[in-house]
Image (cartoon, rainbow, N blue to C red):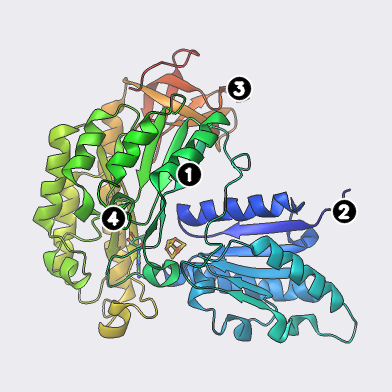
């Protein structure tokens, strides 16, 4: 066994958080740290946390409770809370959880490996029988936070990544939107876009190392570039990335309905490497609720945008997020959400029960007055409706041929999975690991609730996107 220090990194929350975790991991790996098998053999446990709903936070608080015991058993252990909760609770997190050594907000990951090293040394110095490890480092713990600080971005080591052919690339951080319910502007700060040249350079390095599918990440990814001046837009970025010869598929999440510009629609219509789905959260179908949410559009405007999109790119499917039980949401208002769902027929929906977040407009100035059972029921109604739409779309695909990028083993033994250009999951019978990363045509044989089952038609990757 090697003496290399071992770390465990748990990730919660959105894709942006998962990518941040990858970057933190790559920093630790470069420092000589290796992944631990479990908590028992870890020298460092980091939780990369999410604040978007109370439920996500509760999971972290309870995990931290368990880690208190681990720390008692292994006083040299370094415990870190990083990401959105670190930013949100930076002032009192270590008072509430004294066994936490390190608190690092999502804009301050730059020298996290140095801090982990420092703390390991300090903790080892505390390894004396008379010291109660659960009391932690007191003043000596480390809290890093703030936005736009130097060390904000980590120069990416493209070789450290979980998938050989797929990668996420962050194009901007933060969010400038005024959504009444959302904590993200507090935890992640104002929008900061990366220059196109930097993104293209990173993407090129990823593609040189075998990546063929890139998903661009931003909280409002289609607002990309507005802090960088004229001509710097998501459409321009997509066109630049499209030039990378070995890149085959390009997607981006998450889009805001207000920034679905004609220029972006043209890019979606013209560029053959762009995946055929758009994550375009509507949140609600009621104009009154949308207004209380400060979303800046109406039911009609959302539908108009979708129609403009389909006018030029009819094969693009829309995915949405929905919040049910926003303050004051009446049955009538909720029915408008059902209407909008029926009208658009989304390919996928994520449905959330409203959860008041500290220091947001809706938590401060509105009453969380929709009872939980009503939220739960509305949640079920939307999920059932989405399932119906998904089933309908899946049934329509039966017998068709779809090109998938093979991503790995499926949960069912003897099967593997891939993703279509519409981001649908297709399972097929095989255990041939050499297929991972290939683009294969499959015939769709069976429609399941959340995925499809198909048969691979040929092993030679098709040359052009479907
Ligand atoms: N309560 C419930 N859901 C929320 N979301 C964001 N903030 C809240 C909140 N306070 C949802 C939105 C967003 C998704 C990432 O999380 O639907 O699109
Ligand atoms: Fe959660 Fe939002 Fe932070 Fe992502 S940006 S981890 S969704 S709070």
* 2 and 4 marks in contact (CB < 8 Å): no
Residue placed most toward the observer, 271 or 279: 271
Tell me how far mark 2 sits from mark 4, CA to CA: 48 Å
Which disc, if any, is residue 226?
A: 4
Which disc, if any, is residue 3?
A: 2
298 horizontally vs 401: left or right: left
Task: Give the structural element (helix, strand or loop) at label 2.
Answer: loop
Residue sitting at 67 percent across and 82 percent down? 98
Location of the C terminus by quadrant is top left
* 2 and 3 marks in contact (CB < 8 Å): no
Q: Earlier in the sequence, mark 1 or mark 4?
A: 1
Query: Which residue, given by chain and number where applicable, does mark 1 sit on?
Result: 168
Q: Quadrant of residue 263?
A: top left
Position of residue 31 measured from the top left corner of the image (x, y, whole percent): 74, 53
Picture quarter with ligand 2: bottom left
The image shows residue 339, relative to residue 215, as above or below, that is below
How crowded is the residue under tag 1: few (<14 C-alpha within 10 Å), some, or many (20+)? many
* 1 and 4 marks in contact (CB < 8 Å): no
Q: Earlier in the sequence, mark 3 or mark 1?
A: 1
Instruction: State which mark lies toward you, 2 or 4.
Output: 4
Which disc, if any, is residue 434?
A: 3
386 horizontally vs 186: left or right: left
């Amino acid at each position: 066994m090697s003496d290399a220090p071992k770390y465990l990194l748990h990730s919660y929350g959105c894709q942006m958080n998962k990518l941040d975790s990858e970057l933190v991991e790559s920093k630790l790996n470069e420092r000589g740290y290796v992944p631990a098998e479990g908590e028992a053999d870890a020298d460092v446990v980091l939780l990369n946390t999410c604040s978007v709903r109370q439920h996500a936070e509760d999971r972290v608080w309870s995990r931290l409770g368990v880690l208190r015991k681990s720390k008692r058993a292994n006083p040299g252990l370094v415990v870190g809370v990083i990401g959105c909760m670190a930013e949100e609770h930076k002032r009192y997190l270590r008072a509430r959880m004294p066994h936490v050594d390190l608190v690092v907000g999502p804009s301050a990951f730059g020298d996290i490996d140095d801090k982990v090293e420092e703390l390991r040394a300090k903790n080892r110095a505390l390894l004396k029988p008379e010291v109660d490890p659960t009391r932690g480092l007191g003043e000596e713990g480390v809290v890093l936070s703030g936005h736009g600080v130097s060390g904000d971005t980590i120069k990416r080591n493209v070789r450290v990544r979980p998938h050989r052919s797929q990668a996420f690339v962050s194009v901007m951080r933060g969010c400038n939107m005024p959504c009444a319910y959302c904590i993200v502007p507090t935890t992640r700060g104002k929008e900061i876009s990366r220059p196109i040249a930097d993104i293209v350079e990173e993407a090129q390095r990823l593609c040189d190392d075998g990546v063929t599918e890139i998903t661009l990440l931003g909280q409002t990814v289609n607002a990309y570039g507005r802090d960088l001046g004229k001509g710097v837009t998501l459409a321009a970025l997509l066109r630049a990335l499209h030039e990378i010869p070995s890149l085959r598929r390009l997607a981006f999440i998450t889009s805001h309905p207000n920034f679905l510009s004609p220029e972006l629609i043209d890019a979606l219509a013209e560029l053959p490497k762009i995946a055929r789905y758009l994550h375009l959260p509507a949140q609600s179908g009621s104009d009154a609720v949308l207004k209380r949410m400060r979303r800046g559009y109406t039911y009609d405007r959302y539908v108009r945008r979708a129609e403009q999109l389909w006018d030029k790119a009819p094969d693009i499917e829309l995915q949405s997020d929905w919040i049910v039980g926003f303050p004051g949401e009446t049955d009538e208002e909720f029915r408008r959400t059902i209407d909008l769902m029926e009208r658009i027929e989304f390919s996928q929906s994520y449905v959330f029960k409203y959860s008041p977040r500290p220091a947001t407009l809706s938590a401060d100035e509105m009453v969380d007055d929709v009872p939980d059972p009503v939220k739960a029921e509305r949640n079920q109604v939307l999920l059932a409706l989405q399932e119906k739409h998904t089933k309908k779309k899946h049934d329509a695909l039966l017998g068709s041929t779809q090109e998938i990028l093979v991503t790995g083993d499926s949960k069912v033994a003897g099967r593997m999975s891939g993703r279509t250009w519409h981001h649908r999951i297709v399972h097929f019978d095989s255990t041939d690991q050499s297929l991972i990363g290939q683009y294969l045509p499959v015939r769709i044989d069976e429609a399941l609730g959340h995925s499809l089952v198909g048969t691979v038609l040929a092993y030679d990757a098709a040359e052009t996107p479907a």
